[in-house]
Structures are given as structure tokens and as C-alpha cells.
Image (cartoon, rainbow, N blue to C red):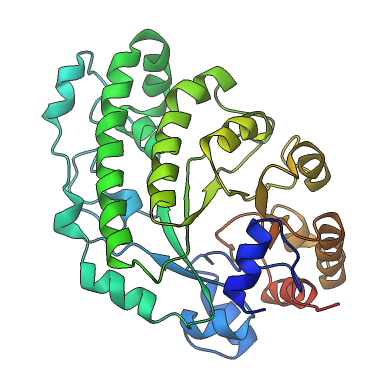
Amino acid sequence: MNSIERFMNTIERKPVDRPACWLGMPDIKSQPALMKEFGVDNMHDLKLAIGDDVYTVEVPYQSETASAIYAAFDWYQDGDVDAENRTLTAPGFFIDAEDPEEVNDFDWPDPAKYIDVEKCKALVEKAPDDKLILGMMWSAHFQDACAAFGMETALMNMIANPEMYEAVDAKIMEFYLKANEIFYEATKGRLHAVLIGNDFGSQRGLMLSPEMIRRFVIPGAKQLIDQAHSYGLKVIYHSCGSIVDAIPDLIKAGVDAIHPIQALAAGMEASNLKAKFGGQVSFCGGVDTQDLLVNGSEEDVKAKVRELRELFPTGLIISPSHEAIMPDVAPKKIRALFEAATEVR
């Protein structure tokens, strides 16, 4: 099997020679050590050297205030969105807004002005023909809406002034649907899957009630999922934390896989997820980055990967349980993860 076949069979819960595996998106501070460990000097060659089945592509976005699409909105009107250190909790542009008509007071960016179609094409053309190309769309409308108000105000508006919250969310969704269409059209025929998502889980449970997730998060998620599916793309949906109580709603919305199985969050043990949802949806992640990859030995990592493979002969894309590998994870642990994941039995 090549990587595309392996990924597709894994995500469709069909037999595989070995599970598909994904490095994720190493933090920029982690990249030099990883490159040194695998004897390369750039991320393209690292993906090839490590045995990654997935070739990740980010949407090329450059505006006057942002250099990443997930930081497209200048909620604080300071002219420069810090993609590394931005927060959801600071008061945003709509902190005092009460009338849904005020949604038009914000200078909403037009993604068509800031996404270079030729760059989109060039990025996917760099990928080897046998690798699964994954578009990192994010489209984090819930997180952006929280930042638009400031998280406390956003959550209060869900209860006290839901029309105001939904007006802002609708404009954010309009932006992402247009941006994604531009990227999907530019990469048609080369792109295979996308990752979208919002963080709405904590270590112990959902940050919102399941009912509020259904009203304020799932409708937007379904629009994004349906859009990707209309282009023939598989959808991996991301949320950190314990989201076990929202998984049935994500399944109904049509997700193909759920990422990242935050292994130490309540209810997110791989065995629990397999028992509850194994025949209904696939997963991506599972190798704990909170403790195991930081403090465990290389043999501990290999043992966990082998355990996951026994539990999920298919239906699990093996990956660290956070898409951004941080500097506290030693590169030799990543080598161990991939050695165990790519063993052909």
C-alpha cells in the first residue's frame, strides 16, 4: 500500500498493511532538533525521512495584519495579529455590542484578497505523488467568535443575547467558507483530506453543555464538513480536551475522523472510544503528549503504539495527541513512535 491507500483504508476502517501515521505540525522551536535527529535540513525532507503518510499543507494567507489564516481577524484593532501568542480571553471588538446590526461595524477581511491561488497550487505540487495531502483549514469559528467578544462575554451572549453571538459567528463562517472554496478550487485533484476544528474540551469535560455545543458549534461544523465532502475530501475534526460527550453530534454532522484523542483527558482513553464509537467513526492521535512522550522511555512509547495497534487494527491514524509537537518532546521519542507505527507484521 502507498500512503494514500493506507490513509483512506484507515479512515474508512478497512484492512491495512499497517496503520496510517502522521507526524502532526511540529512547533517551530521543535523543528531544528527533529531535523537533526533525522539528518535533514527542512520540513519537506523531514516528512519524507520520518515515514509520514501525511503531507500537510497550510493555506497561504497574507494580509496587512496577519500571516496565517487562523489569525485573520484583527479583533483588537492593533494592526498586527500575533499568531503565536493571541488569546481568546482579552476584550475583543464586539465586547460591548448588543445589536446584531453592529456586526457590520467591523472591517471583515475578504479572503480572496489575501489567498494567493498560485501559491496554493505550488504547495500541493511539492508533495510526493504517493503521499496523502492534508489541508490544514482550521476554520475555527467558535474560537474566533470567543475572541471577537472576549471569551467570557461570548459565552454570556450565548445565554443572554444569542442573536448577537450568532450574527458574529455567521460573518466568521462566511469568511471561512469563501476561503476554503478558494483553496479547494485551487488544489482540486491533488488535495485528499482536510483538518478543521475548534477547541471546546477541557481536561475534565466540555467547556459548554452538549446542548450549547449543538446550537452554537455543530451547525457551523456541519457546513464546513459538507463543503469539504462536496469536493470529495475526507474531514478530520479537531478539538483538544475531553469531548466524548460531543462525539455523537460530530458523527451526525458527518466527520470522518476525530483528532487528537487527548489520551489523559476524561473519557478519552482509546479503549473507551473504541468501545463507544469504533464502528461509527475513525480517530487520529492517541500517543499521549502530556506525559508519555515527555517523560516516558522510547520503549514506553513503542509499547503504547503497539497497544493502540492491537486495539485499532484499522480506524486509527497513529499520531501524537497534539498536532504541535513541543520542544519538551525528545526527537528520539518521535523516532520510536514511527518505528513502532510503521512495523509491517
**Picture quadrant where residue 206 is located:** top right
| 297 in relation to 93, above or below | below
Residue 264: image location, x then y, percent:
75, 44
Residue 275: image location, x then y, percent:
82, 40
**Picture quadrant where residue 106 is located:** top left
Camera sees residue 92: no
Q: How many marks?
A: 0
State the residue in front, 336 or 51: 51
Quarter occupied by the C terminus: bottom right
Residue 260: image location, x then y, percent:
63, 51
Residue 332: image location, x then y, percent:
72, 77
Answer with left or right where residue 178 lies relative to residue 110: right
> Which residue is at 13% across, 38% downward?
107
State the residue in front, 198 or 225: 225
Quarter occupied by the N terminus: bottom right
State the residue in front, 117 or 159: 117
Answer with left or right where residue 194 lies relative to residue 12: left
**Picture quadrant where residue 284 is located:** bottom right
> Which residue is at 22% across, 73% downward?
118
> Which residue is at 63% across, 81% downward?
50
Camera sees residue 130: yes
Q: Residue lying furthest bottom in this view?
A: 39
